[in-house]
Image (cartoon, helix red, strand yellow):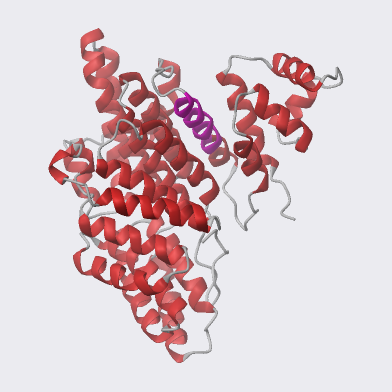
């Protein structure tokens, strides 16, 4: 049996409690009333939230009831596998806060979420820190999104943080009319800054920025943009090895936005659900979501999609299908799709990520020599990309190849990896390339 991980559950309980405006004493009283016992005190709630203790099945059921949270949300938080080198407390808190906010929004997507100076202060302070003294840029959001096709978060995250800071400054100076005009811009800027931070390996600040983006999108009533924010955060967590949280975010995004989104965004959200479900071992749910995504993709008209979804075309949808099929253990139809994706990919990060997935599919097919060659090409692209997400994908491909380390092609591959390791992006999520000659920690994939 997988041991519970209280460091994931504690912050989630605190966020759900605060979302209802309750003190620890009020939560304890509600739990006592639900359970019909006077024995639980606020001190026990405090121990749960500080991760000093873990509530058992009995109290988790009552927590789900009184906090109006899906039981699976609390159960998943206590049953994730502990991996070597897990995210630190800051990442766990940021992720749990985003999960709680996503649950609130999905339950009532028409209700604006609280957006005050306090809710944006932490993200703005981080942006100021990353901006650095004297740094200035004239790159706008549209140009920055296009640059993201060509470079990784290691290069672009400071620019994204600066752009977010500029939008927040403008928002604070504006009147009511200007505020309504700038809120969608804030949502886009926060999502993009969070994506770039996550791609650079800074998951805590990336999740914080996505939380701000969700609040801003909800304040405008734009369900599509809010769903896009959650799809982005979900994909970052899936790539960093936290597929359970990725699945919760993807499902919240789809549940809250599906009635108000374009076919392209609906297909994207379904793909996020499919990949995360497959990576958590929920193959039937993954297949169902993937089949729905394929059907939806047939109706996509790029000219009718939101401008921030410009990159989602037929080639990208096919590549996402290939990746999900590999995660589902169906490499036969996946390999041609991923091979075609590599021929049309826009920049080195995409080539690195899809090349790593193609290498995994080839290993599943038993084509180990070809997988090693593809992985070597993905290694070169990973060095060029400046993307911790690409480095995580490569580490997972290396783990699959390591099972065949006696093969000459794999020995050559691992020699290349050892030589290139000093040049690989650092600060990746929960999966890192291991020491010389060794595989990295096993991730969810």
Q: In terms of image quadrants, where is residue 40?
A: top right
Identify the residue at the far left of this view. Answer: 303
Direction from residue 351 to residue 303 in the image, left or right: left
Percent x, y of residue 124:
38, 27
The residue located at (18%, 36%) in the rendering is 140
Direction from residue 50 to residue 169 in the image, left or right: left
Q: Main secondary structure of the magenta part?
A: helix
Direction from residue 190 to residue 430 in the image, left or right: right
Quadrant showing the N terminus: bottom right
Q: Is residue 98 magenta?
A: yes
Percent x, y of residue 150:
22, 55
Q: Number of labelled discs?
A: 0
The residue located at (21%, 13%) in the rendering is 178
The residue located at (26%, 62%) in the rendering is 348
Instruction: Judge whether residue 152 can be spotted in this image.
Output: yes
Instruction: Judge whether residue 240 can be spotted in this image.
Output: no
The residue located at (39%, 67%) in the rendering is 357
Q: Nearer the viewer, residue 285 or 138?
A: 285
Start-end of magenta stretch: 94-107
Percent x, y of residue 385:
30, 60
Q: Is residue 42 magenta?
A: no
Percent x, y of residue 134:
26, 34
Identify the residue at the far top of this view. Answer: 175
The answer to whether 154 is drawn above or below residue 352 in the figure is above
């Amino acid at each position: 049996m997988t041991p519970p991980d209280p460091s994931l559950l504690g912050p989630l309980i605190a966020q759900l409690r605060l979302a209802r405006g309750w003190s620890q004493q009020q939560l304890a009283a509600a739990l006592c009333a639900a359970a019909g016992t006077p024995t639980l005190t606020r001190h026990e709630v405090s121990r749960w939230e500080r991760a000093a203790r873990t509530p058992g099945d009995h109290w988790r059921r009552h927590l789900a009831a009184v906090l109006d949270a899906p039981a699976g949300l609390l159960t998943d938080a206590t049953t994730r596998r502990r991996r070597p080198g897990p995210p630190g407390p800051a990442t766990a808190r940021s992720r749990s806060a985003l999960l709680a906010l996503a649950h609130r929004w999905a339950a009532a997507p028409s209700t604006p979420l609280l957006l005050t100076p306090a809710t944006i202060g932490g993200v703005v302070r981080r942006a100021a820190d990353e901006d650095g003294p004297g740094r200035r840029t004239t790159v706008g959001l549209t140009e920055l999104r296009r640059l993201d096709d060509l470079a990784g978060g290691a290069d672009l995250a400071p620019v994204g943080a600066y752009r977010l800071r500029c939008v927040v400054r403008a928002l604070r100076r504006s009147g009511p009319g200007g505020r309504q005009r700038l809120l969608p811009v804030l949502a886009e800027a926060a999502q993009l800054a969070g994506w770039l931070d996550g791609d650079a390996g800074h998951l805590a600040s990336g999740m914080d920025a996505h939380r701000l983006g969700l609040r801003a999108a909800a304040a405008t009533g734009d369900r599509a943009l809010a769903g896009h924010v959650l799809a982005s955060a979900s994909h970052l967590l899936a790539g960093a090895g936290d597929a359970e949280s990725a699945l919760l975010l993807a499902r919240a995004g789809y549940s809250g936005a599906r009635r108000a989104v374009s076919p392209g965004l609906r297909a994207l959200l379904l793909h996020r659900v499919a990949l995360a479900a497959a990576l958590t071992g929920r193959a039937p749910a993954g297949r169902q979501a993937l089949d729905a995504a394929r059907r939806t993709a047939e109706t996509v008209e790029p000219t009718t999609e939101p401008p921030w979804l410009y990159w989602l075309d037929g080639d990208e949808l096919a590549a996402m299908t290939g990746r999900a099929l590999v995660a589902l253990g169906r490499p036969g139809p996946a390999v041609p799709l991923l091979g075609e994706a590599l021929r049309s990919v826009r920049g080195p990060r995409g080539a690195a990520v899809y090349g790593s997935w193609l290498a995994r599919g080839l290993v599943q097919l038993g084509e180990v020599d070809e997988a090693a060659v593809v992985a070597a090409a993905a290694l070169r692209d990973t060095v060029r990309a400046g993307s911790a997400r690409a480095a995580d994908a490569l580490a997972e491909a290396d783990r699959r190849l390591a099972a065949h380390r006696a093969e000459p092609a794999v020995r050559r591959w691992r020699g290349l990896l050892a030589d290139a390791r000093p040049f690989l992006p650092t600060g990746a999520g929960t999966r890192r390339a291991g020491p010389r000659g060794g595989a990295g920690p096993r991730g969810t994939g």
